[in-house]
Amino acid sequence: MSEQSIETQTKMYLYELNNLSKEHGFKADDSWEFSMASNADRIKIQRSYFPTNAAKMGPEILLQVLNLVKAGLKQTYTRDDSHIDKNSIIADELDYLVAFNPKRPRT
C-alpha cells in the first residue's frame, strides 16, 4: 500500500468526520472515539451510537490511518494503541476504522 493511499484514506476519513460533526451539531467538547473493529464489532458500535463513521481498509494501513486521523484531530496517542501491530490486526480480523461519540448513544 502506498504512502499516497494512506494519505488519501486519512484525508477522506477526516473529511467525513468533519461533515458528520457539523451535520450533527457537535460542540467543542464533543470528540470522536476510535475503534479498529471486525465487521461484527462495527455493527455493534453502529447499533449503539449515532452518528458513526466506519471505513473498511486493509490491515496493512489500518493502524497508520488511525494514528494519522488522531494526529489530524490533535488527539493524543493512547497506550491501548501501542500494543497493536499488523499481526494482531490480521489475527483479530480488524478491517474497519470506526469513529463514534460515546456521549451520543443511539436511542
Image (cartoon, rainbow, N blue to C red):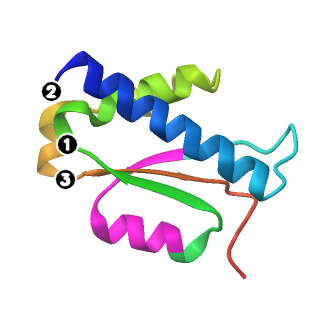
Where residue 39 appears, x then y in whole percent?
29, 66
Answer few, some or many: residues within 10 Å of disc 2's Cα (few below 14, many 20 plus, some between 14 and 19). few
Span highlighted in magenta in the image: 34-46
- Residue 72 placement, left or right of 38: right
Residue with the most extreme bottom position: 107
Q: Nearer the viewer, mark 3 or mark 1?
A: 1
The disc, 3 or 1, on the residue closer to the chain's N-terminal end is: 1
Query: Mark 3 and mark 1: span between their CA atoms?
Result: 13 Å
Dividing the picture into quarters, in which one does residue 5 lie?
top left
Query: Mark 1 and mark 2: span between their CA atoms?
Result: 9 Å
- Residue 97 placement, left or right of 2: right
Task: Say above or below: 95 vs 82.
Answer: below
Asked if the stretch drawn in magenta spans residue 101, the answer is no
Where residue 78 appears, x then y in whole percent?
51, 27
Q: Which residue is mark 1?
A: 58
Which secondary structure dominates the residues rendered in magenta? helix
> Which quarter of the rendering shows the N terminus?
top left
Where residue 8 appears, x then y in whole percent?
37, 29
Q: Nearer the viewer, mark 2 or mark 3?
A: 2
> Which quarter of the rendering shows the C terminus?
bottom right
Answer few, some or many: residues within 10 Å of disc 1's Cα (few below 14, many 20 plus, some between 14 and 19). few
The disc, 1 or 2, on the residue closer to the chain's N-terminal end is: 2
Q: Are marks 3 and 1 in contact (CB under 8 Å)?
A: no
The disc, 2 or 3, on the residue closer to the chain's N-terminal end is: 2
Q: Which residue is mark 2?
A: 1
Q: Which residue is mark 3?
A: 92
Q: Are marks 1 and 2 in contact (CB under 8 Å)?
A: yes
Asked if the stretch drawn in magenta spans residue 36, the answer is yes
